[in-house]
C-alpha cells in the first residue's frame, strides 16, 4: 500500500501541474473566461489522474471490465471529496489555527488528498490483483496503456511550452541594482 500511496501522490502532483498549465493556457493564451478555464483545467486534471491511476497506481487491480464505471465513480468521488473536503477543512482551520492562507490551503489539500486515496484504494480500485492470464506478456513499458500515457505527457509538455514561452517573453527585463 505504501507504493500505491507514493504513486498516488506523484500522480496528484502531476495533475496539479496539468491543471495550472491548462488554466493559464485557456485563460491567458486562448482568452477563455476564468470560470470556464478553471472548470476545463480541473476536468483535464481529474481525467489525467484517473488515467495514470488506471495505468500505474492500481494497474495490478484493474482490467478492461468496468472501466467506465470506475471512471464515473472516481470522477464523482474525487470531485465531491475535493470540493466539500477543502471547504470543510478551510473552515475548521480558519477557526482553530492562525496559519496563513497558503499553509491552510496546503494542509487542506493534504488532508483531502489522503481521504481521496482511501476512497480510491478501498472503493474505486478495490479488489485482488488481476490474474496472471489477464496481464500482457510484454514488458509494462510497452503496454498500450503506457504508450497512451506517454503520448499524453508529451502533449502536456508541448502545451507547457506554449504557455511558458509567451509568459516569459511578457516579463519585464531584470532591473540592475543602482550603486
Image (spheres, rainbow, N blue to C red):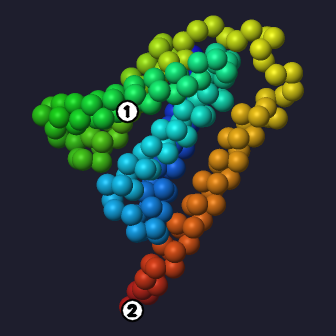
Judge whether 178 appears above or below 81 on screen: below
Q: Residue at x 43, y 83 (%)?
A: 172
Q: From this viewpoint, which residue is outermost toward the right?
A: 138
Residue closer to the observer: 82 or 77: 77
Q: Quadrant of residue 73?
A: top left
- Location of residue 99 with respect to 63 vertically, above or below: below
Task: Kindly state the secondary structure of the residue where label 1 is placed.
Answer: helix
Find the residue positioned furthest to the left. Answer: 95
Q: Is residue 136 left or right of residue 69?
A: right
Q: Position of residue 49 (x, y in %)?
A: 53, 36
Secondary element under disc 2, as helix, strand or loop, is loop
Residue 179, numbered circle: 2
Along the horizontal axis of the image, is 63 left or right of 94?
Answer: right
Tell me the residue that label 1 is attached to.
Answer: 79
Depth check, front residue: 143 or 100:
143
The percent position of residue 31, horizontal first and vertical second, equals: 40, 68
Does residue 171 appear in this view? yes
Amino acid at each position: 500500500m505504501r507504493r500505491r500511496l507514493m504513486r498516488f501522490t506523484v500522480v496528484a502532483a502531476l495533475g496539479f501541474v496539468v491543471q495550472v498549465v491548462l488554466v493559464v493556457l485557456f485563460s491567458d493564451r486562448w482568452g477563455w473566461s476564468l470560470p470556464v478555464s478553471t472548470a476545463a483545467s480541473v476536468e483535464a486534471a481529474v481525467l489525467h489522474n484517473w488515467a495514470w491511476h488506471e495505468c500505474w497506481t492500481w494497474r495490478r487491480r484493474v482490467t478492461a471490465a468496468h472501466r467506465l464505471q470506475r471512471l464515473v465513480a472516481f470522477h464523482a468521488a474525487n470531485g465531491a471529496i475535493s470540493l466539500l473536503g477543502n471547504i470543510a477543512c478551510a473552515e475548521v482551520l480558519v477557526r482553530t489555527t492562525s496559519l496563513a492562507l497558503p499553509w491552510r490551503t496546503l494542509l487542506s489539500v493534504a488532508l483531502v488528498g489522503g481521504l481521496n486515496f482511501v476512497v480510491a484504494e478501498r472503493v474505486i480500485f478495490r479488489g485482488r490483483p488481476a490474474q496472471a492470464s489477464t496481464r500482457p506478456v510484454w514488458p509494462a513499458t510497452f503496454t498500450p496503456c503506457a504508450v497512451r500515457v506517454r503520448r499524453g505527457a508529451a502533449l502536456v509538455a508541448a502545451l507547457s511550452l506554449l504557455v511558458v514561452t509567451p509568459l516569459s517573453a511578457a516579463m519585464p527585463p531584470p532591473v540592475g541594482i543602482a550603486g
